[in-house]
Amino acid sequence: QVQLVESGGGLVQAGGSLRLSCAASGRTISIYAMGWFRQAPGKEREFVAGISMSGVNTRYADSVKGRFTISRDNAKNTIYLQMNSLKPEDTAVYYCAATRQAPITMANSMYDYWGQGAQVTVSS
C-alpha cells in the first residue's frame, strides 16, 4: 500500500509558477512509474505528465509540454511538478498517482494509488 500526499498548490497570476510535491509513504516509489493528473470543474480527470521508475523517461500532455516539468527523487520518496508560464486554463485540482505499468501510461484506470489532490488556481 502506498499513501500519496500532494502539497504546493495555491493561487497564482497568469504567467507565474508553482511547484507541486507528492510525498509517498508506506512503500518505496522506486518500483512505480508516477503520474500527475488534473481535474477542472465539470471536466474529466486528465493526464498531465508521467515519469518512469528510474526517472529517465517522461511524457507530457500536449497542453503542458514545454511549460511543465515532472521529476522524482526516489531517495526522498517524492515526485515534483514544476509548472511555469501558468494559464487560467491550468486551474484544476492536481493529483499524483502511482502505477506498476510500464511504459508510462496516460490512462487513469491503470494507476493503482492516488493522492487527495491539491488545488491550483490561476487568475487572469
Image (tube, rainbow, N blue to C red):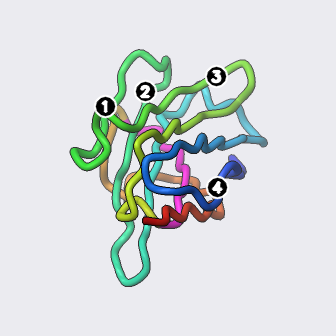
Label 1, residues with CA under 10 Å away: few <14, some 14-19, many ≥20 = some
Residue range in magenta is: 92-101
Kindly identify which residue carries mark 3. Answer: 73
The CA span between labels 2 and 4 is: 23 Å
Q: Where is 41 relative to 103, above or below?
A: below
Q: Which residue occupies 72% across, 41% down?
A: 23
Amino acid type at mark 1: Pro
Note whether 1 is above or below 121 in the view shown.
above
Please tell me which residue is depicted at 72% across the width and 18% down the height of the picture. 75
> Could you tell me if residue 7 is visible in this image?
yes
Q: CA distance from mark 3 to mark 2?
A: 12 Å
Spatial CA distance of label 2 from label 1 is: 7 Å
Q: Amino acid at mark 2?
A: Ser
Left or right of 91? Residue 89 is: left
Q: Nearer the viewer, mark 4 or mark 1?
A: 4
Q: Which residue is mark 1?
A: 103
Where residue 54 sits: x, y (%)? Answer: 49, 17
Q: Nearer the viewer, residue 49 or 3?
A: 49
Secondary structure that dominates the magenta span: strand
Distance of label 4 from label 1 (alpha carbons): 28 Å
Circles 2 and 1 in contact, beta carbons < 8 Å: yes
Residue beneath disc 2: 52
Instruction: Read off the residue under disc 4.
Output: 9
